[in-house]
Amino acid sequence: MFVSPVVCLTVCLAATAVNTAHVAAGDPSEAITTPAEVLTPPNARKPANERELRYWLTNMVAYHNFTITEVRLATGLGEADIEEALERFDIRPGARPTRSPDAPLTVQPYPGGRHPRIGFLEGAIDPQRETKFSVFTPWDPNAYVVVDVPEAIWSNLGLTYLAHTHIDTIWTQREIVLPRLEWRRRRGGRLDITRTLPNGIEFTTRVVPTKDAVLIELTLTNGTDQNLSDLRVQNCVMPKMAPGFEVRTNDNKVLTRPYAACRDVSGKRWVITAWTHCERPWANPDVPCFHSDPKFPDVEPGQSFTLRGGLWFYEGTDIDAEFKRIEATHWAETPPAAAGGRTLTQSQ
């Protein structure tokens, strides 16, 4: 059975490491250095070169409005180095391109360094940022929710993946540490990532922002020599940094499978998520967070299966009518790569 809402496996993400395989190669002379006397935070990820330093500082400060302390927690750099780089690159809080009404919703990899949840912190230690991305609201460019896909994957083998430290997985039981990864960043705000577990199970997440929704895909491939069953997934939305939505209650949630919706204190703005093959929509007021948790069918060796999900924003009071409108878009039948137009290309 799933873990109860009291033991929500919501990932709270601080920072994790840079996978340079997904980063354009930089000049070795551009390597970032930090004074030896500055202790590196345990979950920090130091940018690999000047190009990555500029990208992550823009992500953290211009988009997420991080403080110097939060940047240090995410990068491991010293305060003097951070301040010098911000001045050199002319990066300031909120100084980012203005999104036009017809542009895709703004999506950024979640950088770590700031806890994306308010409570139940002990249930999400050393969170990994490579499962998380931020979706900024269309009504406030500084407000965002953090989406965690996948937060956890269960199977007949046990807890097969967990995007933070809490209860044992089949890997921590064997003292196997999974490598840190990073999102592949594409034009148009698209993201994708693939993780292969030590036993050959592989899962890929794809994120495609459009004008009206963020479409998501989670594909699992069975690279083992045995059938996989009871493949339950936890996908989480955390509204801590969306003012008005962060109240620690379930009274502002509407759960109508496959939809899970959270309204703000005015009752007129909503964040909605849904997944195909949804087994359980639910919410945890302690975090706070809300879920539309799906379940893969059994997957035989060598086979793959894809789940589709989405995130929507809505301004209005008739949430049931909005669920019907979303359903009429056929989001569950639309592959994310097709929804946004051109084929993805590596960010430059």
Image: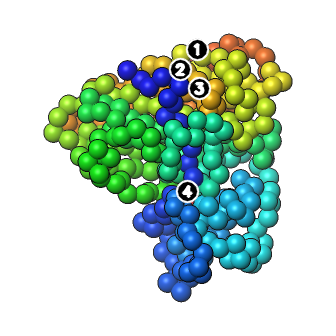
Q: Are marks 4 and 1 in contact (CB under 8 Å)?
A: no
Q: What's the distance in space between the residues labelled 4 and 1, CA to CA?
A: 33 Å
Q: Which mark is residue 15?
A: 4
Q: What's the distance in space between the residues labelled 2 and 4, CA to CA?
A: 28 Å
Which residue in the protein does label 1 denote?
Answer: 256
Q: Position of residue 218 (x, y in %)?
A: 43, 37
Total residue callouts: 4
Q: Residue at x 84, y 24 (%)?
A: 266
Q: Position of residue 203 (x, y in %)?
A: 37, 43
138 relative to 186 in the view: left or right: right
Q: Earlier in the sequence, mark 4 or mark 3?
A: 4
Q: Are marks 2 and 1 in contact (CB under 8 Å)?
A: yes
Q: Residue at x 69, y 23 (%)?
A: 249
Pointer 1: residues within 10 angstroms few (<14), some, or many (20+)? some
Q: Position of residue 34 (x, y in %)?
A: 59, 78
Which residue in the protein does label 3 denote?
Answer: 284
Q: Earlier in the sequence, mark 3 or mark 1?
A: 1
Q: Residue at x 30, y 36 (%)?
A: 304
Residue 143 in which image quadrant? top right
- Amino acid at the residue labelled 2: Pro
Q: In the structure shown, which secondary structural element does the residue marked by tag 3 occupy?
A: strand
Pointer 3: residues within 10 angstroms few (<14), some, or many (20+)? many
